[in-house]
Image (cartoon, rainbow, N blue to C red):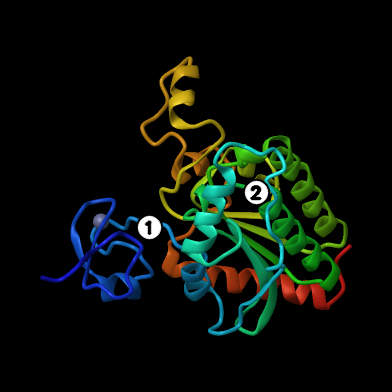
């Protein structure tokens, strides 16, 4: 009998069950469709490697800052074990991978959150990689694209995690000072300390359809609601109607959209009209 795979895992099996409509999909078609269900349009979460494959010029991504490793400075119970298990299972040092990539030959500085690594949480390493991606863009005059996929700050690093909110925000301002554009792509989910820091102050904010976007989690939000929230509360569509997003872009159109933006911004940077 053919192996049924989990959503988002389309290498090596024949079938995948959609997390949205629960229909069974051919794994090869699912992968060709960039891990989007061709029945209901559900955009499944991607690992950072899948995001690179779906987005950038083939073979152009060069990872940087791979030497950074988190320190369990608070001796938080079970943190070291959980972190080590994620590192070994996923073959990456933390929840964010940064580097340089190309879109139609144009260099961009990028950082990609990966929800499969401890919920994409932003600890000191993730924050540093995001900040370095922004600073690299500012210094080398490259547009910056950051893909967000995170439950928020990493509780196991306490205040060190919260400090990343200020640090990444300062990174955005370094880009702003020299006129380097910063594009944030919200994917499922973009929450809490990530939304409340660098992500929501990007020059251009794009989201994938129906992704979860919010500050407090659904349970807390429900308890705090004075009036009944709409059914699509904390989705990309709700946030778009509220004026916080510039556009909702289907995954198959994301590469084209980002390429258009960096082409336009690249010309702006080359002409030296920034500043
Ligand atoms: Zn579906």
Q: What is the quadrant of residue 263 in the picture?
A: bottom right
Cα distance, mark 2 to mark 1?
Answer: 20 Å
Residue ranking furthest to the left: 1
Foreground pick, 57 / 131: 131
- Name the residue that disc number 1 marks: 43
Label 1 crowd (10 A; few <14 / some 14-19 / many >=20): many
Residue 112 as seen in the image, left or right of residue 39: right
Q: Position of residue 128 (x, y in %)?
A: 74, 55
The C terminus, quarter of image: bottom right
Of callouts 2 and 1, the N-terminal one: 1
The residue under the point 73% across, 63% down is 133
| Residue 121 at least partly seen | yes
- Quadrant where the N terminus is found in the figure: bottom left
Mark 2: secondary structure: helix
Residue drawn at 69 percent across, 54 percent down: 125
- The spot of residue 201 in percent (x, y) is 70, 47
Rendered view: 158 above or below 49: above
Residue 161's quadrant in the figure?
top right
Q: Observer-nearest residue: 251 or 157? A: 157
Residue 114 visible (yes or no)? no
- Along the viewing direction, whichever of 142 and 240 lies nearer the viewer: 142
Q: Position of residue 174 (x, y in %)?
A: 84, 56
Quadrant containing ligand 1: bottom left
Vertical relation: 261 (above or below) 71? below
Q: Determine which residue is flagged by label 2.
A: 199
Task: Find numbered disc 1 in the image and state the secondary structure of the residue it sits on.
Answer: loop
Instruction: Indicate the position of residue 118 as horizontal and vertical percent values.
Output: 52, 49
Q: Residue at x 56, y 76 (%)?
A: 56
- Residue pictured at 87% horizontal, 57% vertical: 177
- Identify which residue, 80 or 263, lies in the foreground: 80
């Amino acid at each position: 009998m053919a192996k049924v795979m989990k959503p988002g895992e389309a290498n090596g099996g024949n079938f995948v069950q959609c997390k949205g409509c629960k229909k069974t999909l051919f794994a090869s078609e699912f992968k060709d469709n960039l891990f989007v269900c061709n029945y209901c349009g559900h955009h499944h979460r991607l690992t950072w490697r899948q995001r690179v494959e779906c987005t950038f010029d083939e073979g152009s991504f060069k990872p940087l800052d791979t030497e950074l490793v988190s320190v369990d400075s608070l001796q938080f119970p079970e943190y070291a074990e959980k972190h080590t298990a994620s590192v070994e299972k996923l073959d990456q040092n933390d929840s964010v991978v940064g580097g340089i990539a190309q879109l139609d030959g144009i260099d961009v500085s990028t950082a990609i959150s990966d929800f499969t690594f401890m919920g994409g949480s932003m600890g000191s390493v993730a924050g540093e990689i995001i900040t370095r991606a922004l600073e690299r863009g500012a210094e080398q005059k490259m547009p910056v694209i950051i893909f967000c996929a995170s439950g928020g700050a990493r509780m196991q690093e306490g205040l060190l995690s919260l400090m990343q909110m200020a640090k990444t925000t300062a990174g955005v301002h370094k880009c702003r000072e020299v006129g380097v554009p910063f594009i944030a792509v919200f994917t499922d989910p973009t929450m809490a300390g990530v939304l409340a820091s660098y992500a929501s102050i990007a020059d251009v904010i794009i989201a994938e359809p129906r992704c979860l976007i919010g500050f407090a989690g659904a349970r807390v939000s429900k308890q705090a609601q004075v009036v009944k929230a709409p059914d699509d509360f904390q989705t990309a569509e709700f946030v778009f109607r509220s004026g916080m997003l510039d556009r909702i872009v289907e995954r198959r159109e994301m590469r084209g959209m980002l390429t258009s933006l960096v082409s336009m911004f690249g010309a702006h940077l080359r002409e030296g009209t920034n500043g």
